[in-house]
Amino acid sequence: MTVQECYEAFEGNYQEVVSRLRTDERIARFLQKVVDDGSYKLLCDSIETNNVDEAFRAAHTLKGVCGNLSITKFGESSSALCEFLREKRVINDEMMPMFEKVKQDYALTINAIKQLNS
């Protein structure tokens, strides 16, 4: 799988990231950091333990990483959850569909990145 195909698979903006990072090798190196980053696990653990501050911080980090790497679909769901947590300052049933969307988009993104590296 090429870097461009990877971006197509997770519904990212390849042209935008190329304009920023310039080479597929550099993009691939940064995408690997997404796989290795602990923010998603922190988000899941924080929601499970009802720690709003840590959940917000993790969602905000994911939003930023996705924005920097033009990982559009995952970035949008992370942003929605981040803004909910910023505004409401609560973990409740209302935010669970947003969290489920983040989980789906994360899985889609990570699977594509892993295919890129194989």
Image (spheres, rainbow, N blue to C red):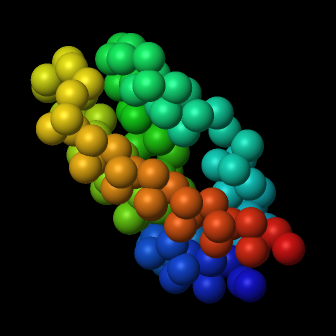
Taking the image as shown, residue 62 lies to the left or right of residue 21, namely: left
Residue in front for this viewpoint, 118 or 32: 118
Depth check: give the residue in front, 32 or 81: 81
**Residue 56 placement (x, y as % from top left):** 35, 25
Residue drawn at the location 54% of the way across and 80% of the way down: 9
Question: Residue lying farthest right?
Answer: 118
Residue appearing at x 40%, y 35% in the figure: 59
Q: Is residue 10 visible?
A: yes
Q: Is residue 85 above or below residue 78?
A: above
Q: Residue at x 51, y 45 (%)?
A: 65
Q: Picture coordinates of residue 79 (x, y %)?
A: 30, 45
Q: Quadrant of residue 84?
A: top left
Give above or below for 54 relative to 104.
above
Q: Is residue 2 left or right of residue 108?
A: right
The vertical placement of 45 against 20, above or below, is above
Q: Judge whether residue 54 can be spotted in this image.
A: no
> In which quadrant of the rendered view does residue 57 lie?
top left
Q: Which one is nearer the viewer's eye here, 72 or 27?
A: 72
Q: Position of residue 39 (x, y in %)?
A: 56, 33
Total marks shown come to 0
Question: Taking 112 as reference, is 80 left or right?
Answer: left
Q: Quadrant of the C terminus?
A: bottom right
What residue sits 20% from the left and 18% below the top?
89
Quadrant location, the N terminus: bottom right
